[in-house]
Image: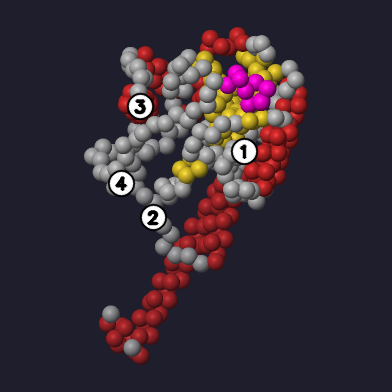
Amino acid sequence: MKEDVYIYLLQEHWLFDCQLNMLNEIHSKYIRIGKSVDTDDPLPPIQMPRGYGGVAILWRKELDPLISTLKAGNSRIQCIEIEGDPNIIIVSLYLPCKGPTNSTQELLECIDELNEIVCTYSNTHQIIIGGDFNEDIINGASSQKKKYINDFMQDHELSSNETGHTFIHSNGKDATAIDFILYQNKYSENIIDIQKLNKKLNITKNSQTSAKTFNKRIKWDKIDTGKYASLISTEISSTKCKIQNREDLESGFNTLNNIIIKATKDIAPNSKIGKKKPKLQVMNEEIRKAISNKKIAFYNWKSNGSINDPHNYYLKQKKLTTYELRKQCRLEIAIRRINERQKLIDSKVTDTKTFLE
């Protein structure tokens, strides 16, 4: 993380509302504000699925007296206001991708929110909108999404600069530009330059490494996050890294990555290696139904506080469905054992080959 950058616009931080405080752990010299996909209707920690989406803005602490946050936009839009001459509105934006069936509706909602923000502040403020547009709005092929965005830019006299490819497909071949910064034409003389940070990585295909991959999921609600932040801050403070060229940038990135990995290993609890539970030996329609009932009962018990009181209704249902599942499994095993014995008895008379086997 380059400390000479005063403001960062983040997209897809993948944090939920109850996890946004983790943005404060990125760097001790920065302050954050952010939104998550569940900002309007926060999920409880026990029901969080895999993370996705989210926007945020980070700024250096010395700018804090000049910055105020704005309650504008939906969960894909985060705004701040900077005091100046004129005041500046900065927007971190994450537009929906093309995949979901409701992506067009989401896009139009975002553009409506942006229209409201620009119309409110365009006469008195300088406005800068930056982020992930999930569309090449300059050189991309014609599409309905590109048209919506370009119409919005034309209506409010907004421009952007071409910075080259900012996204590479997972196939390693296709690349495009999806990240842009929009600014008002009337303030174009204030824009010195817009550049993409180029970073060259030395990656060889099918390369082998002797180091073991650290791939353990951390339960952040059960660890000492203060100790984690302290470990990273201490290591960063003792690291002297001056960025003057691309090689220095790559070295600094690797150093920071190693610091984070080391701190994560230090605070992560030792994993418990247990025996793998055996799968069910039998299966039929009654067992499938019993499994479904058991899952529903467990979900209801979990959703209602995981109370271990023996008189609790949901705990009783959980135990009852577990008992029913085991009963059905034992019954099916017994039936199969009886059938096998009967098969042997019958084969003794009619099929001696099967009997001897």
Q: Residues within 10 Å of mark 4 (few under 14, many from 20)?
A: few
Please tell me whether mark 3 or mark 2 is closer to you in this view: 3
Distance CA(mark 4)–CA(mark 1): 33 Å
Residue linked to disc 2 = 278
Query: Of label 4 and label 3, which has the lower sequence position?
Result: 4
> Disc 4 versus disc 3: distance between alpha carbons?
22 Å
Q: Quadrant of residue 108?
A: top right
Viewer-nearest residue: 108 or 352: 108
Residue 337 image point, x, y percent = 40, 71
Residue sitting at 35 percent across and 44 percent down?
A: 274
| Mark 1 vs 2, N-terminal side | 1
Callout 2: SS? loop
Quarter of the image where one finds residue 95: top right
Q: Secondary structure at mark 3?
A: helix
Residue carrying label 1: 95
As for residue 72 lying within the magenta part, the answer is: no
Point out the tag, 3 or 2, that comes first from the N-terminus.
Answer: 3
Q: Earlier in the sequence, mark 4 or mark 2?
A: 4
Q: How crowded is the residue under tag 1: few (<14 C-alpha within 10 Å), some, or many (20+)?
A: many
Cβ atoms under marks 1 and 3 closer than 8 Å? no
Please indicate, yes or no, whether residue 259 appears anywhere in the rendered image.
no
Residue 205, labelled with which disc? 4
CB contact under 8 Å: marks 1 and 2: no
Q: What's the residue at 60%, 40% (across, down)?
A: 137
The quadrant of the picture occupied by the C terminus is bottom left
- Mark 1 or mark 3: which comes first in sequence? 1
In the image, which residues are magenta?
183-191
| Colouring of the image | secondary structure
Tag 3: residue type? Arg
For residue 246, the mark is 3
Please identify the residue farthest to the bottom as the structure is shown.
Answer: 350
